[in-house]
Image (spheres, coloured by chain):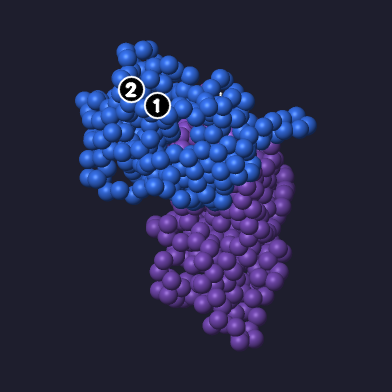
Amino acid sequence: MIQFILKGIVRDKNRSLLPIIIVALGVTLTVFLSGYLGGVFQDVIQQNARFETGHVKIMSKAYAQNKDQLPIDLALLETDKLKDELQAEYPNMRWVQRIKFGGLLDVPDDDGNSRSQGPAAVMAVSLLSENSQELDRLNIRNSIIKGTIPTKNGEVLISNDFADKLEIDIGDEITYVGGTMYGSMAFQNYTISGTVKFGNIGFDRGAVIMDISDAQQILNMENGATEILGFFNNEQYQSESAEDIVKNFNAQYEKSGDEFAPEMQSLEDQNGLGEILAYSNYMSQIIVTVLILAMSVVLWNTGLLGGLRRYKEYGIRLALGESKGSIYRKSIIEAILIGAIGSIIGTLFGLIATYYMQEVGLDISDLLNQSSMIMPSTIRAKIIPSQLYIGFIPGLVAMVLGNMLSGMGIYKRETAHLFKELEV
Amino acid sequence: MEPIIKIENVTKKFPEGEGEFVALKNINLEFQEGEFSGIVGPSGSGKTTLLNIIGSLDQPSSGNAWVMDKNVAELSHKESAQLRNLHLGFIFQVYNLLPVYTVFENVEFALLLQNKSKEERRKAVMQALEWVGLENIPNKKPSKLSGGEGQRVAIARAMVKEPKIVLADEPTANLDATNAHAIIQTMKKLNEELGTTFLFSTHDEKVMQYLNRIIHLKGGEVEKDEIITAQNPKS
Ligand SMILES: Nc1ncnc2c1ncn2[C@@H]1O[C@H](COP(=O)(O)OP(=O)(O)OP(=O)(O)O)[C@@H](O)[C@H]1O
Ligand SMILES: [Mg+2]
């Protein structure tokens, strides 16, 4: 019997084509939009992860509580050892040390007097070590506007806008004025090897990037760091693994009263990124719901039209001894088949569109030129596993729902009424 | 012998505006198994209405209609579908073939509903097509058939399950004389060979000359019930 229905669907283009197109269209939209949203949110999260939060981040308990003030006196010590232990225990992640601190940059003139000054946020990462992944992770190579990456201690990168403001250029000397982690004054001269622009307002306003060994030296923070970041090997955030690692790690130090004991936080625990993740899921759900409703209404109507067109067929089948219930059930089976075909096609197209937007992307840097938003300059979609069902199931449900609604009307008609259609 | 169809005081009313329209008035009729009879009468006299009730597609407003010992007036949807499926065949003025299916598939459909095996279906369908002389074109689509061929497929479809009763509502109205005669002769032959009971509604003189019995309907009432004994159809 299924075969019989299938033949009908395949041969009667009117019966199948329009609904398949509608379902495929709706599903394509759903799949693509969810991939698009997924991509955009993932970019925001990825940027945050790379510059700020890591996939997980370890700080001292005390530092964690005051992290907004960048309290270098509360930094972690013996971090090389801790990092090696982490690498051994969680080999599916890469661990890196960073130091963040603030200070004043002073640009001296020829006489040694101050020519210009400005507050700086310094991020010290592993720039000089041979197998550092930080250059890639922070996309430093591509962000250089002028000059080069530091090749030796004493060279730093400075954000391009900041350099303009201070009226300095590559090769110029700047003086860092600040304090060590023990509270004494610290001065140090650095040479600017290059300027960078990340397309990230926080960084582009007044940042200095230096090698971590330079920072340890000036802050008197030998073998220390304000934070250790963990990144999954594939650079993709995995919520559940991250939570497991956090729980596992923190359990070791739970009972410790030492305020310098390390504490781990996941990406979601920081910077409100958990909310962003939840929000992106919520948005996807709204889109899916709206599209299901819209598709159902359209399909209900096409179902009604199709039903009207097929009164005659229903009449014949009734006369041949098929019960109304059976006709109704078979029209639902038809809907399931058509819905499935449309949904498969739609999912495919949606994935193709997503793939295109993932590989090629939409360059919006011209649009963003005047904007100070923290956004990647190229919008990229992202193929995510949920796209396999996020459109498929609604497509099927809408088709079946639409058909059930329209079928109900036919079901309620008197047999004799349906039969009347045969006399014309 | 128990009649195969027994109409008892059947009245059928249709709502019409404020009041109601009486399409059948207190009809009483009996048909024996193997009859080849027809209902004739002017348009609007209630022929189709009566056939629909016998075919359990409609129910009488009052009275009883016994078909194969089942009272149509009391059957549920499911039971009446069952009755049609097993025992009743229908032939219409327009052939009402399912356009997307082939000749073979149109005839096969009734058997699909009976859950017959593929082999059983194939045999029965080819047999039925042979009865109507279409065994050579099982794979044609209805749109490619002539009027006479279309109506033959409809007969094969009605006959394939070898029902006890075939109800034919003006089966020749859309056919030319040659085809009309051929169709009626085919049905007459099946009536004689298989013992199937045929009940027609018709205006057609050509049909009437083959009938054993003619029931004249007028204004929803039986005007005359005429038994025709051994008579040679003229052509
Ligand atoms: N569902 C219905 N609702 C209202 N009136 C109906 C309905 N079905 C039939 N009638 C009326 O009942 C009367 C008998 O109709 P019926 O179709 O039985 O006539 P008929 O003898 O078959 O006519 P024809 O030769 O034109 O086919 C007609 O006046 C028709 O208008
Ligand atoms: Mg009629």
The reply to whether label 2 and label 1 mark residues of one chain is: yes
In the rendered structure, find residue A274 and report the number of the disc placed on it. Answer: none
In the rendered structure, find residue B228 and report the number of the disc placed on it. Answer: 1
In the rendered image, residue B138, in percent from the top left (x then y), is placed at 26, 29
B76 vs A355, left or right, is: right
* Beta carbon at label 2 within 8 Å of ligand 1: no
In the rendered image, residue A414, in percent from the top left (x then y), is placed at 59, 40
Q: Nearer the viewer, residue B122 or B63?
A: B63
Helix, strand or loop at mark 1: loop
Helix, strand or loop at mark 2: loop
The picture's colour for chain A is: purple
Q: Nearer the viewer, residue B83 or A400?
A: B83
Q: Residue at x 51, y 72 (%)?
A: A244
Are the two marked residues, 2 and 1, in contact with CB atoms closer than 8 angstroms? yes
Q: Which chain is blue?
A: B
CA distance separating discs 2 and 1: 7 Å
Residue placed under numbered mark 2 in the picture = B231
Residue B179, picture quadrant: top left
Q: Residue at x 30, y 23 (%)?
A: B185
B135 vs A245, left or right, is: left
Q: Chain of mark 2?
A: B
Q: Nearer the viewer, residue B182 or A110?
A: B182
Amino acid carrying mark 1 in the image: Ile
Q: What quarter of the picture does the N terminus of chain A occupy?
A: top left
Residue B218, picture quadrant: top right
State whether residue A378 is above or below residue B147. below
State whether residue A290 is above or below residue B210. below
Residue B26, picture quadrant: top right
Amino acid carrying mark 2 in the image: Gln
